[in-house]
Image (cartoon, rainbow, N blue to C red):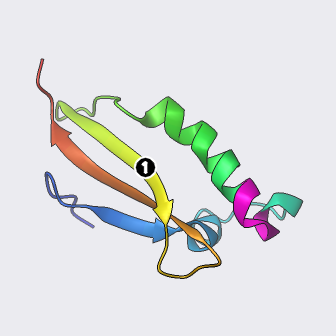
């Protein structure tokens, strides 16, 4: 998948767990725990630069599905 500058890409957290093939864990069942665990990872990634000198803008937002959140990210030109 090609990531276009400024275009938002999103995935539900339950689906992300499946795509990443994470080993089974109790926190996968709970919406609030999924948000907390992925939130820790996002704090590490948010604002990082890519090799193409773009900045990562990553957030967790409420999904249209009330039972899950979604990870939303986009590439932003680095303004240094």
In which image quadrant can residue 15 be found?
Answer: bottom right
| Residue at left offset 62%, top offset 38% | 40
Locate residue 11: give its quadrant: bottom left
Q: Nearer the viewer, residue 45 or 34?
A: 34
Q: Residue 80, image x and y in percent?
A: 12, 17
- Residue 25 lies, with reference to residue 75, above or below; the image says below
Q: Residue at x 59, y 79 (%)?
A: 66
Expressed as whole percent of the image width and height from the top left, the position of residue 47 reads 34, 30
Looking at the image, residue 32 sits to the left or right of residue 5; the answer is right
The residue that disc 1 covers is 59
What SS does tag 1 mark? Answer: strand
Magenta residues, dominant SS class:
helix
Left or right of 43: which side holds 68? right
Residue 37 within the segment the image draws in magenta: no
Span of residues in magenta: 28-33
**Residue 54: x, y in percent?**
19, 35
The vertical placement of 64 against 78, above or below, is: below
Total marks in image? 1
- 4 over 62 or under it: above or below: above
Identify the residue at horizontal 27%, vertical 34% (top origin): 50
Image quadrant occupied by the N terminus: bottom left
């Amino acid at each position: 998948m090609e990531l276009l500058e400024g275009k938002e890409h999103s995935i539900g957290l339950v689906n992300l767990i499946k795509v990443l093939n994470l080993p089974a864990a109790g926190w996968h069942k709970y919406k609030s725990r999924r948000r907390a665990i992925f939130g820790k990872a996002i704090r590490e990634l948010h604002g990082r630069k890519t090799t193409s000198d773009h900045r990562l803008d990553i957030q967790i937002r409420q999904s249209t599905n009330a039972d899950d959140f979604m990870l939303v990210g986009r590439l932003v030109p680095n303004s240094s």
